[in-house]
Image: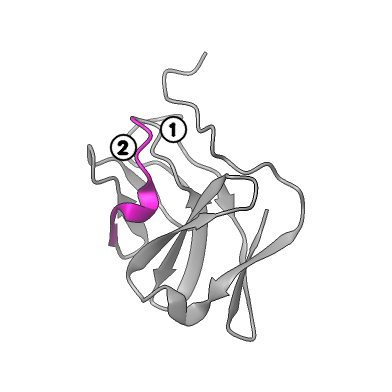
Amino acid sequence: MSKYRENKRKPQREGKKVTVGKTGDVPAGRGATVKLKDGTEIALFNVGGKFHAIENFCPHKGYPLADSRLYGGIVECDLHGWRFDVASGECFTKKDCSLESYEVVIEDDWIKILV
């Protein structure tokens, strides 16, 4: 059993692209919660015009990372300060707490996430 919280809103991998919005919907330096049809969530971040997606869940206490502060390519959980790489999901705060990352594709200004 893991010592961290389980993400019950983590999308199951299906190998399909999901269109989630236009590039102008998420300003540079910001994050957004993407709610999928099945109720699962992904955190989408715009880092200088490049989009990244990771689980929308801090494994420490379950806080949504899309609502947290973004420092370049690092998101810091507003609840207790845990830090994650938004491109890879790597956790910089503790071992064995990295998050799943998702490929983001831009097609004609539409943001698509591979889940």
Please indicate, yes or no, whether residue 8 appears anywhere in the rendered image: yes
Q: Is residue 53 above or below residue 50?
A: above
Residue 68's disc number: none
Residue 93's disc number: 2
Element marked by disc 1: loop
x 29%, y 45%: residue: 77
Q: Residue furthest right?
A: 15
x 38%, y 62%: residue: 31
Q: Is residue 63 above or below residue 86?
A: above
Residue 109: horizontal and vertical position, in percent?
Answer: 58, 84
**Image quarter of residue 102:** bottom right
Q: Is residue 29 above or below residue 95?
A: below
- Amino acid, disc 1: Cys
Q: Are marks 1 and 2 in contact (CB under 8 Å)?
A: yes
> In the rendered image, which residue does mark 1 sit on?
97
Element marked by disc 2: loop
Q: Which residues are magenta?
A: 61-70
